[in-house]
Amino acid sequence: MLKFIHIELLKLRRRKCLILTLAASPIMPFLSMLYFKYIGKPNVEPVLFYKWSVFGFTCWMILPFILGILSSLLFYTESSNHINTYFWIIPVCKLKYFLGKFFILFIYSFIFILLTFIWTVLFADLSGCVAQEISSIFYLSRKCIEISILLPLVMLPLLAAATLINGYVLPVCLTLVYIFSGFMLASQSPCLHPLSAFSVLLNRDGEIPGVPMSPPSLLVSACYCILLWDFFSVLIAGISLKKKS
């Protein structure tokens, strides 16, 4: 498995555009600083600033969209150049091949969230209106770790879909539909979509301002939702890769 991950990392070194996507990590922290400086509100709660910079568009729109594009990118080059044909001649374990790409999502998610964490702490101090403490920074770091682990699991269905779809246009459209459908279901039926179930798990303690605390029964349903979607995603990916071989 480590060899698969190492090979995927070596292939991604040629993708300079992937490094540029990390430049999106300071977008929301910077805009949050501008917003709170503009309204001139003193003594802003650190959690409120974190909601704007990390818990909002960053983990709902920006990072899921990048992970969705990365999912299609991991399969597109090999499929278009027929490189994966040689993998099946060797032969290569289909599950390890798929999971190797899945762990790339984990690594990228961790790096992106780590950069967002650093930018958030930095811009919160530069704003001059957020009184950060060790406890609040520790809270942010804990939530960032949760996001970096949960979001790749949430985006696993798109990685499985990338084994079925060729090209870039359709995966991009599918990513947008996936994100917005999760956003729409978050308030109505949060346990039907992995992305809305992710929001339930993220706010299980009810500490994010403006977001109601999730009941314990809903937490269990959210876990089952993500696990079921991931199970069927791996199953579909395995069948798809087996047919291609």
Image (cartoon, grey):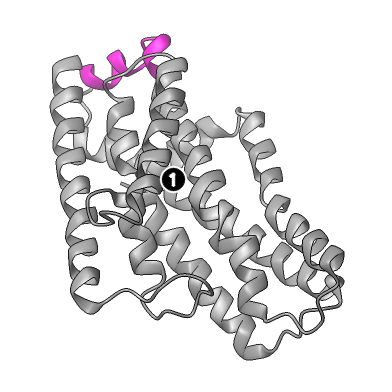
Q: Is residue 218 magenta?
A: no
Please indicate whether residue 232 sits to the left or right of residue 58 in the image: left
Which quadrant of the view contains residue 132?
A: bottom right
Which is the main secondary structure of the residues drawn in magenta?
helix
The image shows residue 237 at horizontal and vertical percentages of: 21, 31
Task: Tell me, yes or no, whether the highlighted magenta stretch contains residue 83.
Answer: yes
Name above or below for residue 234 compared with residue 41.
above
- Where's the C terminus, which quadrant? top left
Q: Nearer the viewer, residue 204 or 7?
A: 204
Q: Is residue 209 above or below residue 22?
A: below
Secondary structure beneath dot 1 equals: helix
Q: Which residues are magenta?
A: 78-89
Spot occupied by residue 51 in the image (x, y as percentages of width and height): 59, 67
Residue 52 found in image quarter: bottom right
Q: Can residue 72 be spotted in the picture?
A: yes
Q: Write down the quadrant of residue 140 in the picture.
A: bottom right
Residue 236 percent coordinates (x, y): 16, 32
User: Residue, x 42% and y 19% (percent of image)?
Assistant: 76
Tell me: residue 111, above or below residue 95. below
Q: Residue at x 43, y 29 (%)?
A: 74
Q: Nearer the viewer, residue 141 or 27?
A: 27
Disc 1 residue type (three-letter): Leu
Q: Is residue 11 left or right of residue 192?
A: right
Q: Residue at x 39, y 81 (%)?
A: 205
Q: Residue at image x 42%, y 14%?
A: 167
Name the outermost residue toward the top: 81
Task: Classify residue 121 as left or right of residue 217.
Answer: right
Mark 1 burial class by Cα count in 10 Å: few <14, some 14-19, many 20+: many
Which residue is identified by label 1? 105
> Percent position (x, y) of residue 186?
35, 54
The answer, for residue 93, to whether it is visible in the render is no
186, 121: nearer the viewer: 186
